[in-house]
Image: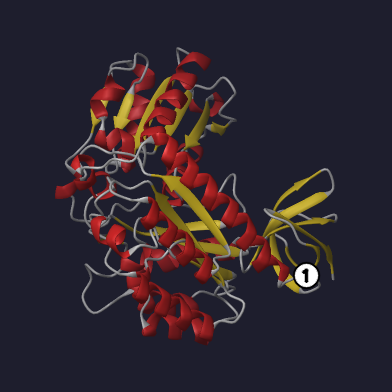
Amino acid sequence: MLQNMKVSYYSLGCKVNLYESEAIINQFLDHGFELANFNDQCDVYIINTCSVTAVSDSKSRKIIRQAIRKNPNAVVAVMGCYAQLKPDDIKNIDGVDVIVGTSNRHLLYPLVIESLQSKNQKVLVDDILNVKNYEEIKIKRFNNKTRGFIKIQDGCDNYCSYCTIPYARGHIRSRKPDDVIAEIQELSNQGVAEIVLTGINTASYGRDLKGYDFADLLGEIVNKVVNLGRIRISSIEVTEISDKLLAIIKENQNIFCNHFHIPLQSGNDNTLKSMYRKYDTTYYKDKITKIRNLFPDVNITTDVLVGFPGETEEDFNSTYNFIKSIEFGEMHVFPYSRRPMTKAYNLPNQVDEVTKHYRVNKLLQLNEELALKYRHKFLNKYVWVVVEEVRNGLARGHSDNYLNVEVKANLNANDLVKVLITDVGYPICKGVLK
């Protein structure tokens, strides 16, 4: 029966969700399901939800309803952060068959099989704050991505005042080093050109282990994995960047991508304090200076949150000027979203939506200016690009320093090629093969 069945998935939000979705899909493919496009009529739809903002909640509901409309007789399974935080909201959507949160993902496949036989709703959402161990769901192959995302940890204990993630993901839980290394070896054996290490708070890895940290893991990966491609670290908190970590990366510059994504959130010390961020602008800037001294031409990208409660025009201007002084290679800019359960929800002086929109747009304009300035450094220079997509004779992918590069050439996905940058733009630079 399963041999003729189609499964599809939609993964919202972060790279961790993408990894988990792919791991779940691996289980279905191992049992004879065919992977189909989410817009096709399928027997099973899996939606991995996000809840980082109110917009994420709304989009999650929209995608769930889209699947139900596509095939009302299909089994619709919902997982992820929105399912963890608001399971009752999802229960009340007619047509949802299976709900798991951010644990028990290994049970999603058998729950779906049960639902194919009897369509009574199955809900399995635990208190994530009581979950102590990392849930191992292995991945053998990536179906829709050329880069290999490897999840190394789950959970966050930072409790920033605007963020629901600790409530959705629980406490820090590190994956066993041997399991991480084995999975990277599996993908390296398949010739995957780039491995992306990811987690909810990636560099907090090892905090729940004895005498072993993120830098130790990186050292073991480099020393033990055979035929290892390049490694990218998806996102890293500035407070987690130790001298030991930088030394490991410096010693293996031929392996680690020349790119750090380091969330800033605000360039104003008062706002950072209200956000419960664990640094000030001086600490942040000093760390960036240290990184740039070690890694010339490094691309430092970031996340910025504007319109936080109490953020005055003067506060925003200081953020703007701080960002300008750092000269990020690229920014993701978000308006503050008021989230229940968080400390910031009840703060006074909430910023109106019009002001948030204005501040977002102002930073996006600055982002384009800074991004182009950084990219101009590489005009008429060579970069190494992993091809991610080929369409109509155009190959597109990312360089090791995270430039989005397009080249007119007959290439295949996952090819690692040397490209001369001939035209600088944002978001896409163009080049020619060496």
Task: Report x, y in % for residue 37.
Answer: 60, 30
Q: Nearer the viewer, residue 291 or 197?
A: 291
Task: Report x, y in % for residue 260.
Answer: 50, 69
Please indicate whether residue 246 sits to the left or right of residue 94 in the image.
Answer: right
Mark 1 surroundings within 10 Å by alpha-carbon count, few (fewer than 14), some (14 through 19), many (20 or more): some
Q: Nearer the viewer, residue 213 or 160?
A: 160
Please indicate whether residue 20 sits to the left or right of residue 292 in the image.
Answer: left
Classify 421 as above or below 220. Answer: above
Task: Report x, y in % for residue 43.
Answer: 49, 21
Classify 298 as above or below 129. Answer: below
- Residue at (83, 43) in percent of width and height: 392
- Residue at (46, 36) in percent of width and height: 28
- Residue at (21, 75) in percent of width and height: 210
Quarter in which the C terminus is drawn: bottom right
- Residue at (27, 39) in percent of width and height: 339
Q: Is residue 220 visible?
A: no
Label 1 belongs to which residue? 379
Q: Amino acid at mark 1?
A: Leu
